[in-house]
Amino acid sequence: MFQFTATYTDLYQLSMAQVYFNKNQNQQAVFDYFFRKLPFKGGYAIFAGLEEILSILEDLRFSEEDIEYLKQHDFEPKFLNYLKDFRFRGTINSVAEGEVVFPTAPILQVEANLIEAQIIETILLNTLNFQTLIATKASRIRNVAGDKTLLDFGLRRAQGPGGYYATRAAMVGGFNGSSNVITGRDYNISISGTMAHAFVQSYDDELVAFRDFAENRPKNCVLLVDTYNTLKSGMPNAITVAKEMESRGQKLLAIRLDSGDLAYLSKQCRKMLDAAGLDYVKIAASNQLDEYVIQSLQNQNAPIDIYGVGTNLVIGKPDGALDGVYKLSFANNKPRIKISESISKVTLPHKKQVYRIFNEDGQQIGADAIGLADEWHLNRMHHPVEPFKNLVIATLKQEALLKPVMQNGKRNHPKKSIEEIANFSKQQLALLPDEYKRFDNPHIYKVGISDRLKEERDRLIAEHKN
């Protein structure tokens, strides 16, 4: 994990914090993290980045270098002295990492003094928005790839160091491994790689290139067969090397296709391999893959065993960002609200709880209801924007999603591995009916607010408009 200091923030956070400090307005506050729009025109998102932000917050502080730098930007000495001892000592309630999440409902709540809560906003949004976006993209790809092996090949095309966390998020979303060595080291992720066209091109003879590679990397050896002519050159040479490996008691793992008509070429390559008695040799494919291309290849019954997905995964194409926000909902013992001309932009006041509502059979999820923190079972939920829409949920199974994950600035549970988070996410996604997972016009998941929360929101709207 990269090391961050508390200057990984926006200037306005520190400007506001100095005012709070000077005016002694450092009271307890509650902030909600949520998003308003699902990415990729999809039906769900996968929450990712929680374990990372908890680790960051446990160690977040201003270094001596930070303090010296801030002296140059008109911050007062007394405030800078306060920052020297800055630590996050707040409480965080959150949905579990890997959970299936939806718009409007708080995913995470921060309860801390105003200065601490304000300073951590930027790094929290930066971490959770990006990883949730990439984990969601990865989940969509996994959903169409079935049990095929999925590898992240995107580090070279990622936005700088973002590739580090993109790999982590891809694993949360269901990928099997990555070419990314440093993230593999730090998170115990399986790493995998083949060769570049440059390797083959650097030799005068493609066969010799394959032989040298197989000799030096006999375990998990994958040969790239499309540098010159896939079916007339690459495949015959790969088959020759595979047979030579067999004579040494070794096995070629796979051949890789990186260009051309992947459906057609994979079928032809499969025929050639099987005819040579190499039915165990797998076929890997790459080249600008995403969920739509993989879905097409699967529909064409392309005999591809391994998909290497790069650019479109790690940059979250086509969206590029999740619109997660961090809004104040309670401060100085009073509920807080942001008013907007658009009811969809009006925030929900008070400290809250989110309940996952199960269908009548209790086997699948069908809605999320947001209530006040002291509500333990909800009778009815209202549409947050359309006031005449409501749903009686009193008899349905309800499960609280926001649970304490950090108290007094320290996590209150052992750190979870990527494998544990990915398995949990897979289990939760299985509870979501298929109509929410389709790419075209997915079913809209119901998110509503309780009677009491609606009353409080409407009361505050009226109060601030008078």
Image: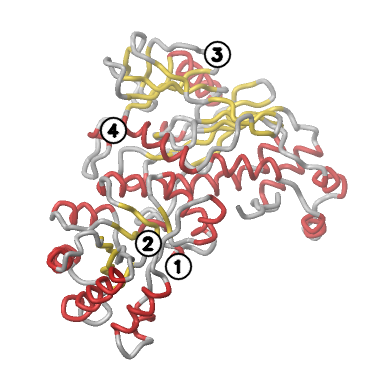
Callouts 1 and 4 close, C-beta under 8 Å: no
- Type of residue at label 3? Asp
- Type of residue at label 1? Arg
* Residue in the picture at 77% in, 43% down: 18
CA distance for labels 1 and 4: 35 Å
Image coordinates for residue 363, horizontal then vertical, percent = 30, 21
- Type of residue at label 2? Gly
CA distance for labels 3 and 2: 45 Å
Residue tagged by mark 2?
A: 310
Image coordinates for residue 415, horizontal then vertical, percent = 58, 37
SS state under label 3:
loop
Answer with mark 3 or mark 4, whichever residue precedes in sequence: 3
Instruction: Give me the disc on residue 444.
Output: 4
Q: Residues within 10 Å of mark 3 (few under 14, many from 20)?
A: few
Tell me the quadrant of the picture where the C terminus can be found.
top right
Image coordinates for residue 374, horizontal then vertical, percent = 55, 13
* Residue in the picture at 33% in, 27% down: 446
* Residue in the picture at 31% in, 47% down: 142
